[in-house]
Image: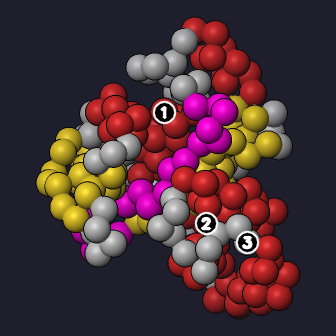
Amino acid sequence: MPEFSSLPPLTCLTTPHSAHLLAEQLTIGPAGMRDWHSISVLVARNFPLVREASLGHWLCHQLPYFRVARLGGHQVVGILHAQPRQDTGTLWINLLAVEEHLRHHGIAHHLVAHAESVCRDWQCQRIGLQCATTNVAALHLYACHGYGLLSESTTELGVRVVGHVKILPATDAPHSCPRPTVRLDARPLRRLYRLCYVLGYRHRSPVPR
C-alpha cells in the first residue's frame, strides 16, 4: 500500500477555495511513533472520556490502524483510528478528529473517504461507528457520506449515541489493483513500542488517566 492516499473530491460543506488548498497540501497516511503526541493531543481535546490506558494500548498494539492527515507533509491536523472486525466484516471507526481551528475545510470528509478506501484492504464490507447525539457536526458529516442510522443507545458512561453503518457496494472491491491486507505489527515490535511508551512518553501524555 502506498504511504499516502490520493484525495477524492470534496463534498458538502467544503468551499472551492478550501478544496484547492487541501488538494495542494493535505495528505493522509499511516501513523508512526513520531505521531504519538499529536494523536494524544487531539484525543484529549475531542474525546474527554477516553483514558490514557486505552489510548496507550491502541498506540502500542494497534498503530497500523491509525491514519493521520497532514498539511504540508508535516503538521498533523486530523486523526482516524479504524479497527477491522473480521468476524462481522465491519471496519469500526473508534476515533476521528480534526484540529478545531481547521474545521469546515473538508479534512474530516477526506478522513471518512480514506476509511472507505482502505475498508476493502482490511477485508471488510461495511463501516460502522457510534456518534454522540450532541455532536451535530459529526452527525451531518456522516449523513453527507451516506451512513444510515441503526439505533440510539446509552453508553456505560451515560452518553447518548447513535449507531451508524454504511455497506460498501461489491464494485468497491479493488479487483484490478489488489493491495495487501493491513496487518498488526509483530509481537516483538509491539513490545518495543510499549517499552518506549511507558518509559519515554506515558508521563507526557495529555490524555487523563
Marks 3 and 1: in contact by CB < 8 Å?
Answer: no
Q: Amino acid at mark 3?
A: Ser
Q: Nearer the viewer, residue 116 or 41?
A: 41
Q: Are marks 2 and 3 in contact (CB under 8 Å)?
A: no
Against 4, is 180 above or below? below
Please tell me how crowded label 3 is: few (under 14), some (14-19), or many (20+) other residues with Cα within 10 Å.
some
The residue to which callout 3 is attached is 205
Q: Residue at x 65, y 31 (%)?
A: 102
Q: Is disc 2 surrounded by few (<14), some (14 to 19) or many (20+) residues within 10 Å?
A: some
Give how far apart the Cα atoms at labels 1 and 2 are: 21 Å
- Which of labels 1 and 2 is toward the front? 1
Of callouts 1 and 3, which one flags the residue occurring earlier in the amino acid sequence?
1
Question: Residue 120: x percent and y percent?
Answer: 40, 52
Provide residue 38's location: percent of width, then percent of height.
73, 56
Where 71 falls versus 158 (above or below)? above
Q: Which residues are magenta?
A: 85-103
Residue 88 is covered by the magenta coloring: yes
Amino acid at dot 1: His
Q: Which residue position holds label 2? A: 64
Quarter of the image where one finds residue 140: top left
Q: Nearer the viewer, residue 7 or 179?
A: 7
Earlier residue among tags 2 and 3? 2
Colour pattern? secondary structure
| Residue annotated with mark 1 | 109
Give the CA separation, mark 1 to mark 3. Answer: 27 Å
Q: Quadrant of the C terminus?
A: bottom right
Q: Nearer the viewer, mark 1 or mark 3?
A: 3
